[in-house]
Amino acid sequence: MERHINNIINSDVSIADLDITKIEWIEVCPLFEEDFYNELMSMPNSKRAEVLVEKMNDKRIVDILFSKFGKFGLRSTVIRSIYAFGQTHGIGYTLKPHVDSYPRVFNMVFHFTEDDEVPEAGTAIYDIKSLGKREYETYATAKYLKNSCTILCLNSDSWHGVDMLMKDIKRDSVVLVFSAEEWNESQMHYADWKPGVTVNYEKV
């Protein structure tokens, strides 16, 4: 079995069980074999997205996600498509607390950095104090580290984002989405180019 499969299996699920926020998420680090990660690092984000759709289109991975997550329920017990998009950001960037809507079931956020100097640039998990007043605080941060990945099980309370980048860095990431709906090539939001495939996986 490939190392990245074992690394996902052996990662612990973290749960933010707060009054409003109920998120299940995993930090996996390292994820890939070093040679493969270095190969990904040599690519532009658009190519990484394409390669990761192919690499992670694996029934074993979907089975692991279904088996690990579900304390607060699953949006769907079927995965009908997998798609990805790359993002590059720098100093001053922030992504305010949000929840990803259905049909997203799981997100895998892959980090691409040559060092571990800015761990705070990873995915932030939020405790929402007041939706109306937009009051919130960072409950935890899935660290932005070399060869790391954050996996989130998505629901209506899965508030996450990115805290403002205070350092002058190039923050490269690829978001891989496991969706309950078939792939539609017109889904081009969030990125200029986004690869995807229709699949047929069900929870066993």
Image (spheres, helix red, strand yellow):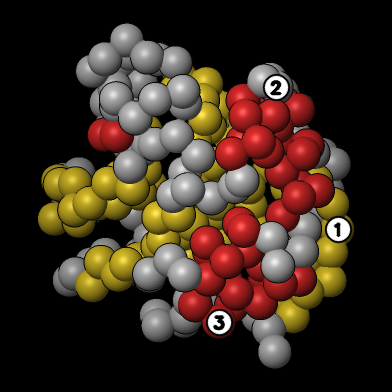
Mark 1 or mark 2, which has the lower sequence index? Answer: 2
Which residue shows up at 45% across the image and 34% down it? 146
Mark 1 or mark 3, which has the lower sequence index? Answer: 3
Q: Secondary structure at mark 3?
A: helix
The relative height of residue 114 versus residue 26 in the rendered view (above or below) is above
Residue 23 placement, left or right of 120? right
Is there a contact, CB below 8 Å, between mark 1 and mark 2?
A: no
Q: Secondary structure at mark 1?
A: strand
Rendered image: mark on residue 67:
3
Task: Residue 3: give x, y in percent of width and height.
Answer: 62, 58
Task: Residue 59: give x, y in percent of width and height.
Answer: 76, 71
Residue type (three-letter) at the residue carrying disc 1: Thr
Mark 2 or mark 3, which has the lower sequence index? Answer: 2
Q: Which residue is mark 1?
A: 198
Q: Mark 1 against mark 3, which lies toward the viewer?
A: 3
Which residue shows up at 29% across the image and 25% down it? 117
Residue most extreme to the top: 168
Q: Which residue is mark 2?
A: 43
Residue 32 placement, left or right of 166? right
The relative height of residue 129 versus residue 9 in the rendered view (above or below) is above
Q: Check the picture and name the quadrant holding the N terminus.
A: bottom right
Residue type (three-letter) at the residue carrying disc 3: Ser
